[in-house]
Image (cartoon, helix red, strand yellow):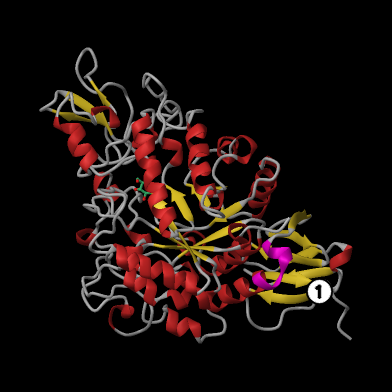
Amino acid sequence: MSAAWWQEGVFYQVYPRSFQDTDGDGVGDLAGVEARLDHLVDLGVDALWLSPIYPSPMVDFGYDVADHCDVDPCCGTLADFDRLLAAAHGKGLRVVLDFVPNHTSDRHAWFVESKSSRTSPKRDWYIWRDAAPGGGPPNNWISDFGGSAWEWDAPTGQYYLHAFLKEQPDLDWRNPDVRRAMYDVLRFWLARGVDGFRIDVLWHILKAEGLPDNPPNPDYRPSMGEMSRVLQTQSTDQPEVHVIAAEMRRIADTYGERVLIGELYLPLDRLMTYYGPGLSGVHLPFNFQLLEAPWNARTIEAIIREYEAALPPGAWPNWVLGNHDRPRVAERVGEAQARVAAMMLLTLRGTPTLYYGDELAIGRVEIPPERVRDPREHREPGLGLGRDPVRTPMAWDATPHAAFTTGAPWLPLHDDWRERNVALQRSAAGSPLSLHRSLLALRRAHPALAVGDIAIVDASGDILAYERRSGTDRLLVALNLGDAPAELTLPAWAHHARPLLSTLEGDAEPAGARLVLRPDEGRVLAPGAPAT
Ligand code: GLC
């Protein structure tokens, strides 16, 4: 059976506000993404996922959608989108949009109507409830951004539910009219030619019938943010959500080979259920384990083993190192290990998703307090939950504002953008960008990497090693997650293997029956005759 494009391909997430501005307002736009498509081609990825581009008051920077079937003026127009899509397809790139089903903006026409009176025909498109008998919110649910998940609406005398900001009221997915309307949104974009969707907070869209309280979280510490006071067992991840996922899947499937990727922050056993019975759910339930894992070879080996073992028959794996909500990989593990992490991401079995800027190894960006834009940070300041640091403008070259904009960028760039930018790294052999290009080229050249099997190779200490194999194509990946030299006893088939790619430059010791990795080194090797 031949692999689908979303199985052998590599995704690249673009945060449109920060990729490329073309009209000087300091905010990226679709014409900018189009102008930079060659970067993605040159890098060697196959598909881009665009975070939301729809009309929005931008209270949650596009995740508060005011109209699902149009483009926000700051991003451009529908015509710009069509041009971008055609240009991307012309270059062999697929385009995936962000679909935000759980909530809308409070300015969406549906919510404006719903809020207008208790008897509005759209009242039951959202989740309205009377106050609790003694007064106060209907239950103890907490918004993911802190505070009660309920907002009082004085004119109609009821509360409405919002899992995120009060400007993001939750839709009621138990209402068939809501489902129909949202499925029409999918059809609108699929008919325009988009190649699929990343589905925002998929595990949130259905709540337990009767909206019972969430149980308290015994492990809660204030540093986790207020949402962690309770366990979201009643407000999220309800069994009936799989019926909805399957409905979305059926719609996508009627348009040919399209992909659905679910955003799901859930434990492994729960995550796996989103493949759906008989693989009727989303194609790729996002696997975020590497975003949170301690950077330790034995822990990550266990994660890979458990994830592979938990996959339902026929389910396709995927891996993620960064996104617009979580700290950047180079900040989490440091720049030296970020190279090892890139090799891991691009050689594990399954579809990788790269986050823009990680190919430059952008690290921690300090956002001065007066420049904080993210409501997550404003609502619970100082806990490190704010997401501005990972949403800063892309750096293209060493000209003013790194050629991101001719105006004033909406967020500051990383401090070292004059040295850390695409133009400089493009021509520097040992740069993070060059490493990513080499890894992606290797992945393209080797079916073992793109679609092959994986088997963990016995290793200890800081080394993580695995074999990838497809037919006669057989490779060994050995990663040193530590900063001291480390040794691996090679399996017999890999004795005298020749190095195909190292994360480090310079001469590495040739492998015999053993392989010595330098500090912070990852290597891909292919079996071959010993050097004479
Ligand atoms: C998802 C998005 C995040 C957004 C939230 C609410 O988690 O990734 O950026 O704030 O949903 O839509």
User: Residue placed at 46% from the left, 78% from the top?
Assistant: 38
Stretch in magenta: 444-450
Quadrant into which the C terminus falls: bottom right
Q: Is residue 528 left or right of residue 436?
A: right
Q: Is mark 1 within 8 Å of ligand 1?
A: no
Residue found at the very far top of the displayed protein: 133
Residue 68 locus on image (x, y percent): 31, 49
- Give the labeled residue for mark 1: 511
Mark 1 surroundings within 10 Å by alpha-carbon count, few (fewer than 14), some (14 through 19), many (20 or more):
many
Dominant secondary structure of the residues highlighted in magenta in the image: helix
**Quarter of the image where one finds residue 493:** bottom right
Q: Is residue 449 magenta?
A: yes
Give residue 160's position: percent from left, percent from top: 24, 29
Please state which of residues 76 and 347 is positioned toward the viewer in this rendering. Answer: 76
In this view of the protein, can residue 286 be seen by the observer? Answer: no
Inspect the magenta stretch and tell me whether residue 278 lies in it: no
For residue 296, above or below residue 267: below
Q: Residue at x 85, y 74 (%)?
A: 496
What residue lies at 27% left-to-right and 41% top-to-bottom?
Answer: 168
